[in-house]
């Protein structure tokens, strides 16, 4: 089940956030964020939304979504995802991704832009590409991967507009 996250969900979400950031392979957040600081970064306010995916009482993952930019850029959305380590390889990322794409469509967004997909995160890159996202550019050596050193960050995009004849 995917449902909106609340402040009361943070104690369950915090370990997923903390462990994902600590792995040093997907997010450029500071390693020393407190739980409160992380909560402020992850729990979106309207018009954005943070959701969590649960199965049989187990937290499998979380996503946050909303406009990529304010004002004149608010017609393009963005999203971020975290899957609990124990849930990897179980389709949690794909289920969250499908939800996020559908949510953006229902909200009237014209596209989704991911600003910083680590190029060595091949599972995520492959998932996004399988859903129709394309790499529109790569910022070389923009991320310090714990395992790979300096690697690129992809900017990825999915159009939500219907094709014009």
Image: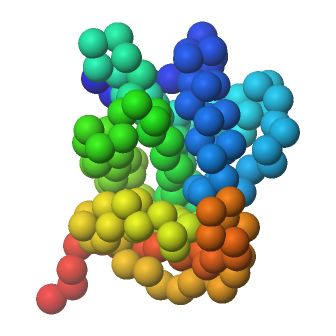
Q: Residue at x 48, y 64 (%)?
A: 121
Pick whichever, 84 or 9, lies toward us.
84
Pick whichever, 72 or 86, lies toward us.
86
Q: Where, quadrant-wise, is the N terminus in this rendering? A: top left
Q: Residue at x 31, y 61 (%)?
A: 127
Q: Residue 149: horizontal and vertical position, in percent?
A: 69, 72
| Location of residue 72 (image quadrant) | bottom right
Q: Residue 92: horizontal and vertical position, in percent?
A: 32, 39
Q: Residue at x 24, y 67 (%)?
A: 130
Instruction: For residue 11, say whether it is visible.
Output: yes
Q: Residue 19: horizontal and vertical position, in percent?
A: 62, 36
Q: Is residue 12 left or right of residue 87?
A: right
| Location of residue 96 (image quadrant) | top left
Figure disc tally: 0
Pick whichever, 159 or 32, lies toward us.
32
Instruction: For residue 72, say whether it is visible.
Output: no
Instruction: Tell me how the rendering is colored.
Output: rainbow
Q: Is residue 109 left or right of residue 1?
A: right
Q: Is residue 1 left or right of residue 36?
A: left
Q: Residue 158: horizontal and vertical position, in percent?
A: 37, 70
Q: Residue at x 62, y 19 (%)?
A: 10
Q: Is residue 42 left or right of residue 119?
A: right
Q: Where, quadrant-wise, is the C terminus in this rendering? A: bottom left
């Amino acid at each position: 089940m995917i449902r909106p996250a609340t402040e009361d969900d943070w104690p369950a979400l915090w370990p997923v956030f903390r462990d994902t950031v600590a792995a040093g392979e997907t997010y450029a957040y500071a390693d020393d964020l407190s739980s409160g600081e992380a909560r402020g970064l992850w729990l979106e306010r309207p018009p954005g939304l943070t959701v969590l995916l649960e199965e049989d009482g187990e937290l499998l993952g979380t996503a946050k979504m909303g406009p990529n930019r304010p004002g004149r850029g608010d017609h393009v959305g963005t999203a971020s995802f975290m899957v609990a380590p124990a849930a990897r390889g179980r389709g949690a990322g794909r289920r969250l991704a499908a939800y996020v794409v559908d949510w953006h469509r229902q909200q009237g967004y014209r596209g989704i832009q991911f600003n910083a997909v680590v190029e060595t995160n091949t599972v995520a890159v492959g998932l996004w590409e399988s859903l129709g996202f394309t790499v529109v550019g790569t910022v070389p050596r923009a991320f310090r991967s714990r395992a790979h050193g300096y690697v690129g960050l992809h900017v990825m995009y999915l159009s939500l507009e219907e094709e014009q004849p």
